[in-house]
Amino acid sequence: MIRRKNTMYNVLTLNSISEVGLSKLNPKKYIIGDDIKDPEGIILRSYDMHEMELPDSLAAVARAGAGTNNIPIDKCSEKGIVVFNTPGANANAVKELVLTGIFLSSRKIVEGIEWAKELKGKDNVDKLVEKGKGQFTGPEIMGKKLGVIGLGAIGVLVANAAISLGMEVYGYDPFLSVDSAWSLSSKVKRAGTREELVAACDYITIHVPLNDSTRGMYNKDLFDITKPGARLLNFARGGLVDTAALKEALEKGTITEYITDFPDAEVINLDHVICIPHLGASTPESEENCAEMAAMELKQYLEYGNIKNSVNFPSCSIPYTGKARLAILHRNVKGMVGAVANAISDEGLNIDNMVNNNKGEYAYTLIDVDTFNGKGQEIADRLSKVDGIVKVRIVKEA
């Protein structure tokens, strides 16, 4: 695919996307709409793409949010489509709702509000309130133990906020990143395993992505060793908690209250459950932050070939200095870098800069040369025939 000066990029929006974010895409370079044909980029929030036919023109999908279970990741990878998300952009909004959930789980606030509504039209409301308030007592959170499973952008903010509220906080994350480690309060105690954490904590909050390895991770085995009377919060994804095991834990009293932002037909009918209608990121600030971040990720990839915050391809970037640029998405196998370098040198061209990174089964190579001398498409066509190369993009022609 050759990009020339003044060529427009087509971007399809599959949900309503904040104009604050879309404004980051220069209207002189981008055509944006919900009826775009042959898009190079897609921006979406919750739209389910699994049954969608992916056009050959599509180079990237940007999810304005953290979760990507509504996007067919494997299918995109096979077609050389880079999928981005926006980790951290909605973290503060979710953190605030998690803190709300902790209070709701503890103080029987929802039950009290519903009971108070029944007093409308009655005499001596003040006396009825004083008489009935005792049924809604609940513990304070200060001094209690909070366990945070998953210390990404949201988990770190929740842990730090809970420390400020006087809680004793334990964290578990075997894949803790350097950035998260720097941001995490030194007062947060490390739990060696999930089992150790749930056995000790009065409140447990889950902040991990939903994938094949985490689906149903809070199962009967974990409930069986959870501290009796614990309160469980799930503002990550509904599928992380095994519903049958949850029901049994609620009936036994192992879990006193379950707070979730992901109600479904089964969970909503359980006792001692507070269902919130997926409001974690439902703030104007969060929607704007996510849309802006998604737009900038898409812009950097389409215009310069740079990748940041992709869930299926590695981070990779080269500052653009005006040279010709080639981007190759390929399998993470031996010989790819050599095949790419040979194809370029065989045409008498000199590589000015090259970066290669990998992530799981896939890798990405970004190359700058002084000029293609009109041979850019020829090189791209040759590379496209190499076994293991998924997609070749001519990002810039000098």
Image: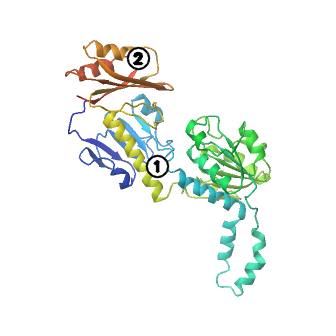
Q: Quadrant of the C terminus?
A: top left
Crowding at mark 1 (Cα within 10 Å: few <14, some 14-19, many 20+):
some
Q: Is residue 59 left or right of residue 132?
A: left
Provide residue 154's location: percent of width, then percent of height. 57, 48
Provide residue 244's location: percent of width, then percent of height. 70, 46
Q: Which mark is residue 46?
A: 1
Instruction: Mark yes or no: residue 304 visible.
Output: yes
Q: Amino acid at mark 1?
A: Ser
Question: Label 1 near label 2: C-beta < 8 Å?
Answer: no
Q: CA distance from mark 2 to mark 1?
A: 35 Å
| Mark 2 residue element | helix
Q: Amino acid at mark 2?
A: Met
- The residue sitting at 48% across, 47% down in the picture is 65
Q: Which mark is residue 336?
A: 2
Task: Pick whichever, 314 or 228, lies toward us.
Answer: 314
- The residue sitting at 46% across, 49% down in the picture is 46
Mark 2 and mark 1 lie on one chain; the one further toward the N terminus is 1
